Image (cartoon, helix red, strand yellow):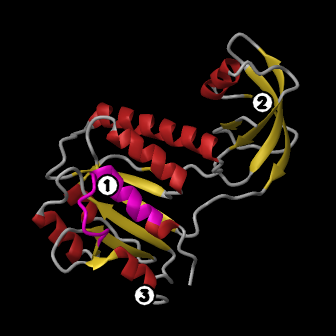
Amino acid sequence: MPRFHCATALHSGADLLLPAGAARHVQVLRLQPGDAIVLFDGAGGEYAAVVERMGRSEVAVRVGARDPVEREAGQAVHLAVGMPANERMDWLVEKATELGVASIQPLMSAHGVLRLHGERADKKRAHWEAIAIAACEQCGRNRVPVIHPVRGFGDWIAGPADATARALVLSLAPGTRAIADHVAARPALTTAAAWRVLSGPEGGLSAAEEQQALRAGFAPVTLGPRVLRAETAALAALIALAEVPPA
């Protein structure tokens, strides 16, 4: 059944007009009055709904019963990523959303080629938010991951830390412990409420940035003997951690 995100808070029995993006999608799908759809507002759960009226650019729906179903990951994983260039960041946001990421912090780092400031950064963030919403509509998630504003690495790493989260930084340094070992070392490492994962761009974090992360309390981890692309590494870490059941 078609699913659509609605930024307006939903409640059973409401009559409302779908947001412009969702309305266009309904029209593209050639849905008609009487057709059933599913709506979610990002606050958890989803609602049955029925198309009531199709206008030239408007779609009116009646909101039905709420289903409290959740499809979130076993543990929250917050990714901080040195932004890969071109369309690779788009792909990362889409796939991380499908895999259950709780939030994504785009970072400008020493080896990163993507530099975003001001209006351009705001537009990119809105673009990534739209990608995350579309991914939620497709994969069944009812909570949209937070896409934070773009920040410089130094500014971000110096900010306040989340004391409830276990912090890991992906590292290629010799002797670095495998991420699987961190997961296996229970319960000490998995009683945290969430995971924070820092992953570099193409070329990885600089030596200075990695040292800053270590001083900030991030534990260095490796994903194995192979060197992964920036977007692949972040997703591999997410897969390794998101479905770890609470201890």
What residue do we see at 28% from left, 47% from top? 83
**Quick check: can you spot residue 80?**
no
Query: Helix, strand or loop at disc 3?
Result: loop
- Kindly identify the amino acid type of the residue bearing the numbered disc 2: Leu
Mark closer to the observer (3, 2): 3
Badge 1 local density, few (<14 within 10 Å), some, or many (20+)? Answer: many
- Label 2 vs label 1, nearer the camera: 1
Q: Quadrant of residue 50?
A: top right
Quadrant location of the N terminus in the rendered image: top right
Mark 3 sits on what residue? 185
Spot the residue most to the top: 56
Q: Is residue 101 above or below residue 175?
A: above
- Would you name the residue on which mark 2 appears? 16
Q: On the image, numbered disc 1 is attached to which residue?
A: 81
Left or right? Give the position of 140 relative to 231: right
Query: Is the C terminus in the top left, top right, bottom left or bottom right quadrant?
Result: bottom right
The image position of residue 48, as x and y in percent, is: 82, 41
Point out the stretch of residues depicted in magenta.
222-239
Counting every numbered tag in the picture gives 3
